[in-house]
Structure formats: structure tokens, C-alpha cells
Image (cartoon, rainbow, N blue to C red):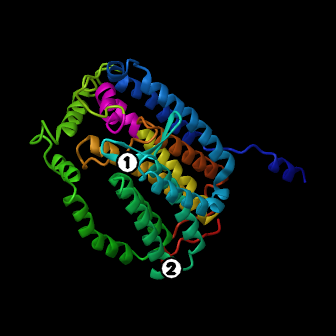
Amino acid sequence: MKAIASASTAPVRFDALLLCAVLSLVSLGLVMVYSASAVMAQDKLGDSFYFLNRQLLAVAMGVVAMAVGMKVGWRRLARLAYPLLLVTLVLLVLVLIPGIGTTVGGARRWIRLPGFGLQPAEVAKFAWVVYLSYSLAKKREKVATFSVGFLPHLLLCGLLVGLCMLQPDFGSSVLLVFLLFALLFAAGTKVSYLVGSVLLALPLAYAAIATSPYRMKRVLAFLDPWAHRHDIGYQVAESLMSIGSGGLTGLGLGDGRQKLFFLPEAHTDFIFAIIGEELGLLGVGVLVVLYALIIWRGVRASLAAPEVFGTYLGLGITSIIAFQATVNMCVAMGLLPTKGLTLPFVSYGGSSLVVLMGAAGVLLSLSASAQPGGGNRPQRSGGDLREVAA
């Protein structure tokens, strides 16, 4: 009885390494957002701390979201799968309505709230992972069938992607599709269904790019940024110059030159370039290590989860962070066309930061209940992700 009582009162142990990695990235983001935006904010807004103050507000909200995620826990999210998805669909429709959605840079992606701008696509990423995890866990005995396991999820993904493309938000659309395929593969969907749908979608993807002048410009800038150095390839070329000038140790914190009205979006989508310029290869290496730690600990907690829903949920949250970080860094280095995805926990952006910190809180709650060396382990034998006894 004493053993049972002591076990019930034992403190919940979250993954300290995962928590430290997330908070380190958030702290680095605050420093780099100020460094990248201070001069521009002073010149255009008369306040060099403008973007830093807004990012600090987002961090405060993110800490609350993380605490809520840890307190609510991953198990309770299963009951919120449908409400979260419904709220997301409503928000994605509302943002398209003139007067409610705000247009910035030709895209209607934000709903302005007092002191804060909500980006529904960021909420959609998390809600989509929660719904997929719940649905696949519930249907996992039939997940390999086309009519139950594959087609309904594909159609719902098409609806979410369609709403995102109307904004337009191509980067979030690609991420939603990636999450679908990643979790379907983990759940045991037939690979032939995944490959076949990709082949069928290629003409649609080509049409989406070819019929959109700004997307075509991004592709041309990716293929040869130096040939378009002074027009469509300007941003990528400046980013490459910024990273290349950093060398091994960088020019020094605050001493970057490209942020001085040369590199557009230096504090948002291209903050990685400023990190490379001011902190050099060593700073970039630390950044990559922190993301690697999050991915490692996230996958570790997911595979050790006591329930299959937790496994899918952990893998989905980890996939969001891994995908966005990889794409953002590759875009800054000219390895991928511009997508408009933020660098997780680092880039300026309230909606992205709050949602990701909340998702990190859920991942931490999963790590507290995970059982290393036992619990749930993924096996694709027979096409299913099965629970295996320790």
C-alpha cells in the first residue's frame, strides 16, 4: 500500500532536455528578432523595440499555451478532435471574408484581434494532427482499406488545402498534405495508395504553379537566383550573400549588414540568413542541434507512448516542427523555392509561436507518460501500427 501511495504522489517528470531545447530556441528567437528588426523598425515605425515587444507578448502567450498543453495532456485531446477541426474550418472560412480577414502582401491570411493577429492556417496544422491521430487510432484495424482508411482523410485534407489555397497559403497547404502522408504511412496505409495519389496530384500541383505568376516567379528565382539578381531572385540572392558572409564565427551579434534594408523579411521568413551572417557556421550548427534534439526526443516519446493515439499525435507534432525547420532553412540557402513557412520558435510571428509552444506542451505531456523501452512500438508488419507488450 505504501508503494502504491508513493507512486500516486510521485511528481510528474517531463522531458527536461526537450523543454530546454524549446526554450533555448525561443530565447534565441527573441535575440535574433530584435537584431534583425531594430534598424528597420526605428526607421519605419520610430520604435526599434516594436517587433521585439510584440514577440515578447507572443512568447508570454506561448508560455501560457505550453502550460495549458502540459496540464490538459495529450489524452484529453482525443475528445477535442472534432471540435478543434470544426473551429479550424470556421476560421479558415472567416479569414476569406472581406472585413474580417486582413490582406497583407496580397494574401488574406490574418484575422485581426485586439493587439494580436490570428493566422488560422497555423491553428489548422495542430488541429489537423489531432484529428488525424484520433481518426487513425480509432480506425486502425481498417486503416489499410481505401474506403475507410485512405479516401475520407484525403478528401478532408483536400477541403483544408482548398481553403488555404484561397488565401493563398501554398506553404501551409504543402505541410497539411505532408502531415497526412506521414501519419497515414505510420498507421499502415498501403504505399501504393500514397504513391498513386502523389502521381495523380502532380498535374494539379503543376497547374497551381503555372497559373500563378507569383509562384512561377518563385520557381524561376529558385532555379537561378543570380540570373534574376535584381528582380524576382533578389530575396534569395541576398539571403545567400548573408549566410555566406558569416563564415565560421559570424560577423558578430548585431553586426549583420543584410538586415540594413537589403534582405526583405529578415526577421520573419529569412531570419535563418541573419543567424548565419551574425553567428556564423557555429551558430547555425547550434540551431540545427537544437532542432535535432527536439526531433529525437519527440520521436522517442511518441514511440514509447502507452496508447496508439499518443504515438500518432507525438509523431505529427514532431513532423510539423521538423518539416517547417527543414523547409525554412533550405529556402534561405536556396535549396527550395520560397514557401513562406516560419522557422519554428525563432521567426517573428505570434500565431506560429503560440501554436507551436502549445503543441510543444502537449509533446511534453506525452513525454511524461511515455515508457522508454516499452509501451507502443511501430511495426509495419501486416500494414498496421500495433501495440506490442514490453
Q: Amino acid at mark 2?
A: Val
User: Callout 2: 10 Å neighbours few (<14), some, many (20+)?
Assistant: some
Question: Circle 1 sits on which residue?
Answer: 108
Label 1: state its secondary structure: strand
Q: Quadrant of residue 31?
A: top left
Which quadrant of the structure image shows residue 267?
top left
User: Magenta-highlighted stretch: main secondary structure?
Assistant: helix
**From this viewpoint, is residue 315 visible?**
no
Q: Mark 2 to mark 1: distance in Å?
A: 34 Å
Can see residue 287? yes
Return the residue nearer the eye: 307 or 92: 92
Instruction: Select label 2 or label 1 by which is in front.
Output: 1
As drawn, the label of residue 308 is: none
Would you say residue 113 sits in the magenta stretch? no
Q: Is residue 284 magenta?
A: yes
Label 2: which secondary element: helix
Residue sitting farthest toward the right: 1
Position of the N terminus, as image quadrant, is bottom right
The kind of residue tagged 1 is Arg
> Residue visible at 54% across and 42% down?
357
Q: Residue furthest front?
A: 99
Circles 2 and 1, Cβ within 8 Å, touching? The answer is no
Q: Nearer the viewer, residue 204 or 66?
A: 204
Disc 2: which residue: 148
Judge from the rendering whether residue 194 lies leftward or rightward of residue 293; answer left or right.
left
What residue is drawn where x is 36% and y is 77%?
192
The segment highlighted magenta reads 268-288
Residue 304 vertical placement versus 351 (above, below):
below
Observer-nearest residue: 85 or 12? 85
Residue 340 lies, in percent from the top left, at: 33, 46
How crowded is the residue under tag 1: few (<14 C-alpha within 10 Å), some, or many (20+)? many
